Image (cartoon, rainbow, N blue to C red):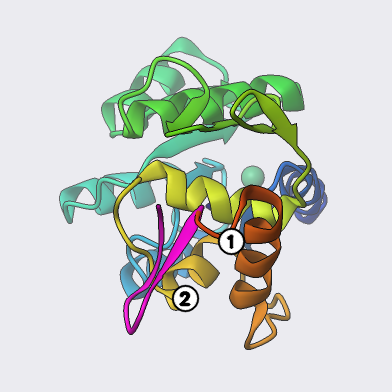
Amino acid sequence: MRILLVEDDTMIGRTLQQALTQDSYAVDLVGDAEAAKVALDTTPGAWAMVLLDLGLPGKSGLELLRDLRRAGNRVRVLIVTARDSVSDRVAGLDAGADDYLTKPFSLDELAARMRALLRRDIGREDNLLRHGELTLDTATRIVTQGGRAIDVSSREFALLAALLEHPGAALSKAQLEERIYGWGEEVESNAIEVHVHNLRRKLGVEAIRTLRGVGYALA
Ligand code: CA
């Protein structure tokens, strides 16, 4: 799952990016509202969520959020900011944020809030994505098949999560790459094929179907 992080403090930005990457998110970092706006206008739908700082150089995070909502962009937005007054929170939520977290925060809480928002997107009450015998727990990062735990790499986990979010729907190779790799990540041309191959080895060849000319889907 791909996240757009809008944060001008390079240290906080890099630290968050690193922590979330370990959590199997692909994280793209931008330092101001303009860059975020260009990214969101250019590839709408690439990001499952925007983590938005409010105090940014130039246009503020709040202005960016208002612009996005005015233009009809419904992307999930979690404000992460040092501004902790009640009026700031109210302004953020009223401008269209889905949630609001104040700095300093614990990474565990951020991760839990992100999962809660992502659940809301697909109408689930728990952290489990299910399809047939397969389950994937986005909190514990455990994948099971018929009750048996399956060991998967973090990219395999992200690929499987993308497919499990819309079971039955096919995702093209480009869509899968877009969901599991961030900007500037070296992606081998056969990377998706390799992950699918490895997942089939672990889950059975039938688990993931290849739809010729379309992409991949769960069986
Ligand atoms: Ca800032």
The residue sitting at 63% across, 49% down in the picture is 203
The residue sitting at 35% across, 81% down in the picture is 212
Q: Relative to residue 144, is residue 88 drawn left or right? A: left
Binning the other alpha carbons within 10 Å of mark 1 as few (below 14), some (14 to 19) or many (20 upward) gives: many
- Determine the residue located farthest toward the top in the rendered image: 86
Single out the mark in the foreground, 1 or 2: 2
Residue 142, magenta (yes or no): no
Question: Which SS type dominates the magenta stretch?
Answer: strand
Q: Is mark 1 on a helix, strand or loop?
A: helix
User: Is 17 located above or below residue 216 in the figure?
Assistant: above
Q: Distance between the residues labelled 1 and 2?
A: 11 Å
Kindly indicate the quadrant of the structure image that contains residue 159: bottom right
**Ligand 1 within 8 Å, label 2 CB:** no
Q: Can residue 48 be seen from the camera position used here? A: no
For disc 1, the marked residue is 180
User: Is 125 located above or below residue 217 in the figure?
Assistant: above
Q: Give the percent coordinates (x, y) of residue 92.
A: 38, 29
Q: Can residue 65 be seen from the camera position used here? A: yes
- Depth check: 73 or 118 in front? 118
- Depth check: 69 or 167 in front? 167
Which residue range is magenta in the image?
Answer: 207-219
Residue 217, magenta (yes or no): yes
Q: Give the percent coordinates (x, y) of residue 73.
A: 24, 52
Q: Is mark 2 on a helix, strand or loop?
A: helix
Q: Give the percent coordinates (x, y) of residue 185.
A: 71, 75
Q: In the image, which disc is placed on residue 173?
A: 2
User: Is 104 located above or below residue 211 in the figure?
Assistant: above
- Depth check: 2 or 63 in front? 2
The residue sitting at 35% across, 26% down in the picture is 120
Q: What's the amino acid at mark 1?
A: Ile
**Within the displayed image, which quadrant is ligand 1 positioned in?**
top right
Q: What's the amino acid at mark 2?
A: Lys
